[in-house]
Amino acid sequence: MTRDSTTRRGAMGALVGAAALPQVVATQSSAARGGDAEPAQSLFVDVELQVAESAVAAGVIFKIVDTAGGVATVYRRTEAGSDRLYEEVTAEALRSARGGALVGIDCGNVERALHGRINLANTGADLTGERPGNAAFAEMLAAANNIKGEAWAPGGSIRLTGSEDFLLATDADMSRLTVIVDNWTGAFVLADDEGDPKEHLPGDDVVERLTDGDLQAGNRVLSGWADLPETNDKLVVLETSRPMYSYRGKLQTEVVINITSREGFLKYPLKYTIDKASIMKITLRPLASRRKHVVLPTFDIRKAGPRATDKRGIQIPYILNRMTRADIERGHFLMATGELPDNPDLMRNEYAALSVISSPSVPWVGRHDGSGRRESLYALSNQRTCGLTIKSAIAIGDGWGASGGNDNCDLTFVDCDLSRYDSHRPTQYRMRLVRCTIGYWGVLASMMGDLELLDCTVEQATPLRLKREASVISSRVDTGGFCDGGLLVRNLTVRTYPVGDDEEADTIHFMRQVARGSDNPKPDGSPVDYTWFKWIDIDGLRVEGPGFLRFEPTRFQGGPRGDDPARLTLPERISIRNVIGHVQYQYDFTGRSFNAALADDPFDIYIEHTGANHDRIFFQEDERGDIAVNVSLSGCNSNASSPAFADTLGLIRTNAPGRYLLTGGSFSRINAYGDGANGGWPKGTVFLTAYAPVVNDRAAVSGENPIVNLTPRHNGWAELHQPQIHLASVARYAADGTTREARCAGLLNARLVDPVFLQHPDDGGGSFALIPANLAGNEFTLTNGNMREGQQLQLAFGAAGHGDFPLPAPGGKTSLAGIDDSGHGQFLVLERVEDDRLRVLSGRDVKGILLASA
């Protein structure tokens, strides 16, 4: 139906007749209305019911659209008034594909008022991409921004040239559009339309109202802002004059990123106490009053030229996102297989807050820096964001990686594919990676908060991998290497691939700690705890492939730049549980400083392993004896084979003074001997207690290495309760270039309580010459039926004693001297009462091991 009325606007509102809207009326459908509802014959926008009733005759069905509320109500005119038939759609539905059925091809006021959707096709754009479309693209964005509607683009391509920026401050759906970059050097800017940020200097109420109590570490309520409405619902950037750290040799002052809601409530607790007198500036950036939904186009940059730079000298990104409270999707980049001529960010999130970015595709592309060295760009960059979540991002690559950032607060990645993440300036509060796949560079961490890796996979494979640089987590060298927070890891998989023929080539570092002491020292007055994580908690670690993982959370990989490992204190506690695969644990405390939080504790660090398989475990301290470590290993089994440590597989080296508790598990040797500058012996005392361990002495050995290498001159002792000791055959020992006596002699240095000795099948021929002792009473049962008169035997008993004697003929006697459990000397007389039994005739009850020469 077509009416001859015209548009009337006045105090009563506006009447829009069907004559002015032929396309709108003609394109209505039952699908758009839903079901079999009767269609409206006249349409009115933002008018009172009485106005519409005065314009139609009885029996006419008409619709009134409330653009503010987003509801379209349909009535039937009667003689007495109107009957309400149904309400059609909400504002969200009007902007959906279904709502688009009500929109004609015009780009007029009715379309804007009814749907808030501005169609790029209605702006005269060339959607073949043949001619520049800057004007049409800008017109669509400006119109949508003006009515806070939706910028919508059909399928096709639009070509952009020149250097202008394009601003989007509202919703958009450009999922079908391809933007061809033809030497365009501007940015596609996503921003809010809530007003400009405001800076507040000392003397302003915003600064002066703050109290010392407000600014204490751990506080979340700024009471001085309780009655300051200008502080409500803001992104807060607080800057002080206090030095925090050095970045590439330059002093960096304090920057705090946070969010206020109402009455001074902060989203995140303050990390450090702030000195009010040091505040230089507080910037309050308004948060969006409504949540926006933006679907980005595809950017074709295969023929893009060099990018321009901004006032700071930083290259302008293709997408610059400053939206808050936004759901942003897509943003895919088409790139050539070669290199870009420069190093821009593809997508930069700057001051973005409380937003979710889903499925951006910003893969790596190489570049040359002029020297012929090939590197890659930070395709996905985050700068001073707060509460930002990035989901399903593709930012894979090689070289330096494809994602990084500075001064972010509470940054989360979910289901992303990243070559690495590089936090240059520290991330505040927390950085969390959930179900992400990370390339061989891993995470370069600089933290003023916690780092969390939850259900992630690290792919340590690339033909360009540099030796000794692959790592799951590395310290950020140019901030001084600190991570002032905790490390939480859950269910991490590390996939290794062979890339070399030596140990270092196949080594993957779990934690690689490097610092530049001379370049970036801790400034005086900094509240930052220069530590390599305050605590480490790992539960679930699986290492796959032929390589092995080296876990060295305390080792410092220094260099020739005046590096000082003592600058970074060690964690207070390290807890590792449920590890499968080839892992070497190396705790090297040489020259390191311990955390001040344990200053009054009897121990300097606590280390706990539970169910953590290992190739070998080292605890090392070669320089001083004034430290004490507390180590607990529970249910930790050595692997049956190793790609790199055949000669030391299953070795536990306890060269750091302290207390060691082993519960269950298995190992091949315990060694307190070291290669340090002090004769190899730790100055402090090593106390080791093991309950029901399995000692599996089957590894290939190099030289005469005792199973337990711990003697009184090591300043320590070891006690093994109910150990199950598996020993190899004489032939195996001979093949390994040692003797059974040398291997077993170390057991004499430990106190054995109810041991059980077992032998492996003879794998090389010859007799098995170990004689396990029957520890009941004063008789020893000889298990080898080939014992001969005069054969040299050795009886090990007590905590630190043994004696040698010849085996007498049946009925004969012999004697030997030794030391009992209490350290007292004993003289024993033994009689061979039968071929397979020796009886102690004099001396105290003994428990020991009877060994025979081959």
Image (cartoon, rainbow, N blue to C red):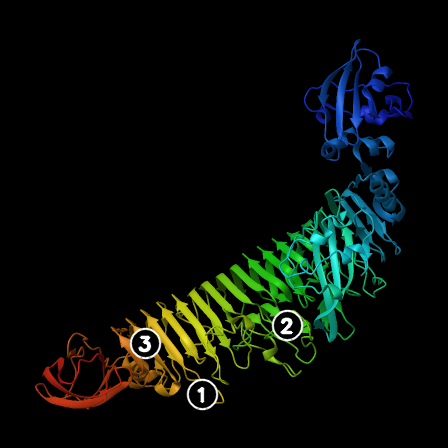
What is the number of callouts on the image?
3
Quadrant in the picture for residue 804: bottom left
Image location (x, y in percent) of residue 27:
79, 26
- Identify which residue, 442 or 589, lies in the foreground: 589
Q: Which residue is farthest left? A: 811
SS type, badge 1: loop
Quadrant in the picture for residue 432: bottom right
Q: Which mark is residue 241?
A: none
Query: Which quadrant is home to the C terminus?
Result: bottom left
Asked if marks 1 and 2 touch (Cβ < 8 Å), the reply is: no
Within-10-Å neighbours for mark 3: few <14, some 14–19, many 20+: some
Residue carrying label 3: 719
- Identify which residue, 271 or 615, lies in the foreground: 271
Q: Amino acid at mark 1?
A: Gly
Q: Earlier in the sequence, mark 1 or mark 3?
A: 1
Q: Earlier in the sequence, mark 1 or mark 2?
A: 2
Residues at marks 3 and 2, CA–CA distance in whole angstroms: 40 Å
Residues at marks 1 and 2, CA–CA distance in whole angstroms: 30 Å
- The residue shown at (46%, 66%) is 581
Residues at marks 1 and 3, CA–CA distance in whole angstroms: 22 Å
Residue carrying label 2: 481
Q: Is residue 532 above or below residue 266?
A: below
Is residue 334 in view? no
Q: Amino acid at mark 2?
A: Gly
Q: Image check: 498 left or right of 213?
A: left
Within-10-Å neighbours for mark 1: few <14, some 14–19, many 20+: some
Image location (x, y in percent) of residue 15:
87, 23
Residue carrying label 1: 680
Q: Is residue 220 above or below residue 150?
A: below
SS type, badge 3: strand
